[in-house]
Image (cartoon, rainbow, N blue to C red):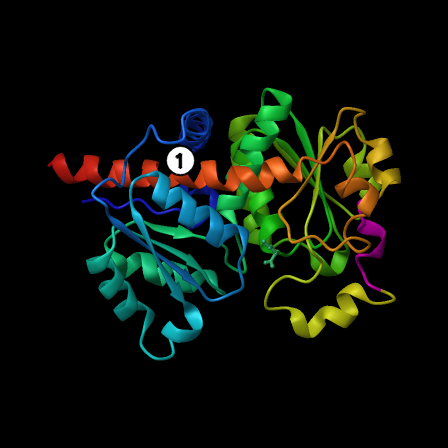
Amino acid sequence: MTVRHFLKDDDLSPAEQAEVLARAAAMKADPFGDTALAGPQVVAVLFDKPTLRTQASFTGAIAHLGGHPMIIDGNLAQVGVRESIADVARVLGRQSVAVVWRTFGQERIAEMAAHAGVPVVNALTDDYHPCQILADLLTISEHKGRLAGLTMAYLGDGANNMAHSYLVGGATAGLHVRVATPPTHQPKAEILSRATEIAASTGGSVMLTKDPYAAAYGADVVVTDTWVSMGMEAEKGERQGIGSPFEKFRVTPEVMGVADPAAIFLHCLPAYRGFEVSAEVIDGPQSVVWDEAENRLHAQKAVLSFLLQHASADAVTP
Ligand code: NVA
């Protein structure tokens, strides 16, 4: 059986990403129409980092699909400390039909996927947050009526999971992705080059700049993220304090003023008003962050259903 995982944005091809987004939109319109987990079947959901939206939306998503979420606190499980990731994967793979994991290094979730024998979904790692990008793409398509050809500007920490997933997931959708970030916080070179390669095949593009206004100019979508990602708490002073390298990358009304007049603003949350975004922007009329937060539920239902369907289709097809 070929097991499909969703560990990073390009684990879905452009056509598959479009299929998942269409499925998410259909599920939003008909919340209980898909019973991929009816049985009920169990999905393991582990958190090595804090969570609000991800736990809420996966719990709801699994319940809507007719299944049961098995929420595991990473502090208790101590994956990779108390026992190896491979052994945890083998155990969870015998007790659940899919594993959803929020953790640190990308190599940890790759190791889980190598041994679980069931689909593994990345619920955020240091390098990627692909479920969030599916929710963002759903939100953008709802507000703009399309994805391919739109311009999305990301301002802030170019080296974090959101920047990476916007690059790869946005390029997959055919977006023109612009990242404005200080020279000290550039995206990983291999991720930037993968996004560029994907963009060449989808009609999108990738641009990296140190000028937030150049990124935002004429953009259809403006996005940002916290300057202090989970796991970086020790750097909070230098990232948010006086002299922060991100200071000029705040999304302000002035930045929104150079974007397309119909531009929308997204933020994965949690948001820190006065740091990465001005309150007037996130609480203003161009902000669609609450739609975006709701869409985590619909997007994750769709991706779980897609992965499980592929696993079972492969199981019955020799
Ligand atoms: N970059 C942020 C995203 C939070 C959803 C973090 O990793 O904390």
> In the shown orientation, is residue 122 left or right of residue 260?
left
Q: Residue furthest bottom?
A: 82
Which three-letter amino acid code belongs to the residue tagged 1?
Ala
Give the position of the C terminus as an image quadrant.
top left
- Please provide percent x and percent y for residue 212: 81, 44
- Is 57 placed above or below 186 here? above
Give the position of the N terminus as an image quadrant.
top left
Front in this rendered view, residue 221 or 204: 221
Magenta run includes residue 245? yes
Residue under circle 1? 302
> What residue is shown at x 68% (from left), y 51% (from top)?
225
Q: Is residue 249 visible?
A: yes
What predominant SS class does the magenta segment belong to? loop
* Secondary structure category for the residue under label 1: helix
> In the shown orientation, is residue 84 left or right of residue 165?
left
Front in this rendered view, residue 162 or 287: 287
Magenta run includes residue 147? no
> What residue is shown at x 41% (from left), y 29% (from top)?
27
> What residue is shown at x 82% (from left), y 63% (from top)?
244
The crowding category of the residue bearing disc 1, from other C-alpha atoms within 10 Å (few below 14, some 14 to 19, many at least 20), is many
- Please provide percent x and percent y for residue 214: 82, 38
Which residues are drawn in magenta? Answer: 244-251
> What residue is shown at x 29% (from left), y 40% (from top)?
66
